[in-house]
Image (cartoon, grey):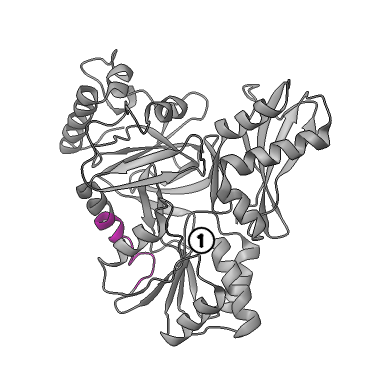
């Protein structure tokens, strides 16, 4: 994999900055040869990275956080994953992401209803608002927690032309629109992000917004930052274009970590953000599987979650934390696996446990309580009917990779469209 000399220089400067100022990266790069390339850099181990990224005595950051913004992701309370951005990094990220909004279908003069969630150190609403400020639109900052009657009335009163939200939020709104207004024909564009948009969801949203195109607003995550923009000439909402040259995206083999450059071969997606120096992200696994559509053009297709985290509806639950819940509850078990399913048009989280003994009904109750404890957001979305309740499956053996024999940590059984 080769990049221009200027990008190589920026990457080398970033690595030297990280190694010189971050204890975590100093140790990680202790054996790095002098003539290294991007592929020589170690891939970040997420467990080690987040264990070092603490609120006190942080070992990942390269200096004090004196301006900017803080976000928390992962839905956990006992071991939160905190992302730190300086003011310049946050501003720059919004500016780059805004360059992809027209590809997503946003036009000058659009009246955009922002229905992402705000507060509790969550990034969706704020980042969308900051990005929309950089294009010629009128913002309707409604937020995802607003009552549906208020949301519908606001869309009608201000003649909204664009609605932006999580797919689960869009479905809830669409059902309310169908029941109370029939349809909103003035909305010409529905933007989504944060989770997959399934066919059963699309059918409901299309009935409520009959004149709207449905497109992704772009691809980003709280920890990995911005990752891709929509592609104008693609009908596949899973296809994005990398934000080159400021973000280097790689697809690597899930078993060997061999870099992949040919189209159509699935692998694990990594990001190196050349613009982030406070909390460097260098060959960081973003948690998704992908394949190149065209490596030369930087276009790629998302294929679902990798084994770093389980995205159930709009909630991400990291596998290490889910396993810790099972380990705290079940005295002995021989294996653990997470499965994601689609049941009754909603996502469902399944924890599959092998070789366990005991009163399974009591164990299931304890495991469910443990998941609610580490992820109050998951519990809240179950209560609201956005996602299905947790299911625990007791099995004799877990599904393994037929090529390597390794247990597959995360199985996504949901349809791809």
Q: Is residue 104 magenta?
A: yes
From this view, report whether residue 162 is shown above or below residue 248: below
Q: What secondary structure predominates along the stretch shown in magenta? A: loop
From the top left corner, tell me how far across and down residue 232 is, in percent.
38, 63
Asked whether residue 337 is drawn in magenta, I would say: no
In this orientation, does residue 400 appear? no
Image-quadrant location for residue 110? bottom left
Front residue of this view, candidates 289 and 341? 341
Image check: 82 left or right of 9? right
> Considering only vertical position in the picture, is 212 above or below 3?
below
Q: Where does label 1 land, which residue? A: 166
The local secondary structure at tag 1 comes to loop
> Percent x, y for residue 87?
22, 49
Q: Position of residue 41 (x, y in %)?
A: 32, 24
Residue at screen point 57% across, 44% down: 375
Q: Which residues are magenta?
A: 94-106
Q: Total of numbered circles in the picture?
A: 1
Residue 46 on image: x %, y %: 45, 30
Up-down relation of residue 159 to residue 247 (above or below): below
Image quadrant occupied by the C terminus: bottom right
Q: Residue at x 21, y 18 (%)?
A: 35
- Left or right: residue 274 versus residue 411 is left
Lateral position of residue 385 relative to residue 261, left or right: right
Tell which of 200 and 177 is nearer to you: 177
Spot the residue most to the top: 31
Reply above or below: 320 against 243. above
Instruction: Classify 10 Å Cα crowding around label 1: few (below 14), some (14-19), many (20 and above).
Output: many
Q: Looking at this view, is 244 or 3 the one in front?
A: 244
Residue 82, can we see it? yes
């Amino acid at each position: 994999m080769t990049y221009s000399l200027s990008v190589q220089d920026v990457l080398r400067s970033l690595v030297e900055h990280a190694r010189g100022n971050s204890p975590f990266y100093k140790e990680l790069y202790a054996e790095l040869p002098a003539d290294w390339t991007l592929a020589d850099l170690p891939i970040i181990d997420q467990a080690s990275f987040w264990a070092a990224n603490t609120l006190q005595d942080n070992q990942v950051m390269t200096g004090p956080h004196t301006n900017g913004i803080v976000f928390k992701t992962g839905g956990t309370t006992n071991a939160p994953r905190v992302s730190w951005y300086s003011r310049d990094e946050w501003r720059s990220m919004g500016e780059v992401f805004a360059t992809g909004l027209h590809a997503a279908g946003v036009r000058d003069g659009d009246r955009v209803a922002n229905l992402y969630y705000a507060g509790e150190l969550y990034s969706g609403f704020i980042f969308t608002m900051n990005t929309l400020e950089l294009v010629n639109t009128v913002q309707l900052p409604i937020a995802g927690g607003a009552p549906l009657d208020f949301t519908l009335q606001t869309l009608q009163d201000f003649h909204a032309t664009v609605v932006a939200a999580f797919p689960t939020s869009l479905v809830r709104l669409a059902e309310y629109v169908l029941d109370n207004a029939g349809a909103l024909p003035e909305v010409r564009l529905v933007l989504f992000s944060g989770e997959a948009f399934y066919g059963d969801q699309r059918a409901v949203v299309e009935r409520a917004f009959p004149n709207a195109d449905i497109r992704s607003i772009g691809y980003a995550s709280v920890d990995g930052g911005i990752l891709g923009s929509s592609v104008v000439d693609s009908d596949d909402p899973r296809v994005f274009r990398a934000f080159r040259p400021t973000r280097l995206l790689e697809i690597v083999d899930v078993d060997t970590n061999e870099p992949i450059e040919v189209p159509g071969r699935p692998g694990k997606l990594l990001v190196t953000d050349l613009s982030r120096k406070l909390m460097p992200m260098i060959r960081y696994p973003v948690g998704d599987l992908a394949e190149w559509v065209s490596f030369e053009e930087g276009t790629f297709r998302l294929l679902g979650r990798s084994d770093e985290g389980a995205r159930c509806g709009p909630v991400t639950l990291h596998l290490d934390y889910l396993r810790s819940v099972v380990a705290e509850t079940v005295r002995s078990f021989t294996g653990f696996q997470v499965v994601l399913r689609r049941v009754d048009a909603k996502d469902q989280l399944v924890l599959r446990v092998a070789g366990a003994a005991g009163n399974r009904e009591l164990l299931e109750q304890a495991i469910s309580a443990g998941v609610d404890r580490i992820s109050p957001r998951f519990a809240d979305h179950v209560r609201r009917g956005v996602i299905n309740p947790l299911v625990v499956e007791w099995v004799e053996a877990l599904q393994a990779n037929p090529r390597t024999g390794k247990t597959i940590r995360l199985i996504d059984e949901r349809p791809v469209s």
